[in-house]
Amino acid sequence: MPADLFQAKRQEMRDEFFAKLFLLGGWLGGTDTYKRTMWAAVPDIACQHAAYTLTLRKGLPEVGANNRLIMAGHEAMLAQWFNRPLLRSDIALSQQWYANHSATKAFPSEVWDAVLAQPGDAITLPLDVWGFPGGQTFLAGVPCLTFEGPGGLISYTESAMCRYFAPVIQATKARLMSEATPRDAEFGLRSAPVEVCNLILLLARFVGGAGSAGAAQLTSNDTAEFLYPELFKSIGTIGHEMMCAGQSFDKTLAAAEYEMMDRFVSKMGTASLLCDLVDAETVGLENALRVIRAHPETDRVGVRVDSGDIAAQCVLYFNEMKRLGIPPRVIVFEDEVTPDGVRRVYDLFRTQTGLEPTMLFPGAGGYWWKLVHRDTVSAAFKRTATEDRPNVKFSNSPGKETIPGYVRVHARGDTLVVADKSESIDGEPLFVKLVEQGRVVYAEDFRAQAARAERTWGRYTRWEASPLVADHLSRFNAMRKAEVAVARARLG
């Protein structure tokens, strides 16, 4: 098959993948209802220039995260509103529905009329987005993106853009896993709600975990390998369903297990043999070693343990192979493996054998989906400026106060400096333009993003506000403190 035919189909599928993320064909319902009621009530404010920031206010509650997060997901997240222009006819139809037929009859006509003043049927949103590039490490509490333009329009994007929590969590998890093991940890398909979710998070995992070590590449998602053959490699081996297929009441379970193992190796020449169909520490152990010894023509047959005391089983299988004179084989271990779990398996192996666990291979499985929800990082999308006025959202909960202004972030040594775009900061500017007047302008290679994650992961330990931002915060907090004190006295 000519390579260009593969490339044509690949490009078609990539385009379709990101187009699927566009908010239901560009219909203006892809937001919270209160966006309509709020901006219909104050149309003058809706049309004013404003800034909103996306801030992930908490780090991952995992060993080694240390409040650090890795940016990822621009390609998918920005596609939700900016994959293609909106259609004039769709906007008009939305206005008719929400103003006259919805249970909540409200539509911010003024802000959308201003958008429709542009010529043509293809309507782009007059919004700019700045933020960290893919792979950039940042700290929880530091704004990671800023949206600038008519405030009522930016407000519409909140629901979609808060979803950045998913790829950022996934990229950070990948970095934590890469620190726990030099071996890749396979990212499965079946845990995903839909395959599109799997692809989004698989790309984020690559950004966070690939780096110079070339990890974060193995997957059982065949579509991912076809779409991005330069990034991913498919892996497949024997599964329980095939092992079970050999069972019957007129043969022993051990015989059925051995038969399936042997047939697979005879045909494929490589395998990670499942040993727990009957019992991993007795029958499965004997059958796996028997198959390995019966096929001296290949050294690509190892084992896979995924139930019971997997750390002890890794030691058991290694020692039994050594006793029989079998050179070390790959031992895949899985069972909701986490980075901390990988370290425990490795530590036991070192203690029991005195060797480095170079033949042990983690299959992380469900780990990649744990804690992947908004509350894990407390994603918040808040207004920080209106025209030339800084805005702050206060809170009675620690850590929920927003940072005012048209935010930009700079690096100075091990410190992230959160500043206003009007300031001149002695440091490296980290924000890049992602969207310009409704069109995505960020198009960085995934390998370049992964290299940035590798460079920046250990770099930052603290963050601070710039002089102007600190002054705004101080003044607002002083106003708040005084007004609250007066109100308390009035209320008795």
Image: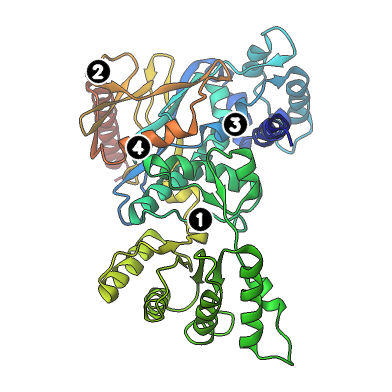
Q: Going from the N terminus, do you reach mark 3 or mark 4 first?
A: 3
Residue type for callout 4: Thr
Report, in whole angstroms, how far the alpha carbon at label 2 lies from the one at label 1. Answer: 42 Å
Which residue of the protein is positioned furthest toward the front in this rendering?
Answer: 297
Q: Which residue is mark 3?
A: 35
Q: Are marks 4 and 1 in contact (CB under 8 Å)?
A: no
Q: Which residue is mark 1?
A: 186
Q: Secondary structure at mark 2?
A: loop
| Vertical comparison of 398 with 42: above or below | below
Residue 216, percent across and down? 46, 47
Dot 3: element? helix
User: Are circles 3 and 2 on residues that touch, CB within 8 Å?
Assistant: no
Mark-to-mark CA distance, 1 and 3: 41 Å
Q: Nearer the viewer, mark 2 or mark 4?
A: 4
Q: Is residue 176 left or right of residue 85?
A: left
**Residue type, label 3:** Lys
226 or 429: nearer the viewer: 226
Q: Could you tell me the amino acid type at mark 1?
A: Glu
Query: Nearer the viewer's eye, disc 1 or disc 3?
Result: 1
Question: Distance between the Cα atoms at labels 2 and 4?
Answer: 19 Å
What residue did someone put label 2 on? 425
Q: For the residue carrying disc 3, how many other residues have a C-alpha within 10 Å: few (<14), some (14-19), or many (20+)?
A: many
Q: Quadrant of residue 130?
A: top left
Figure check: 363 above or below 216: below
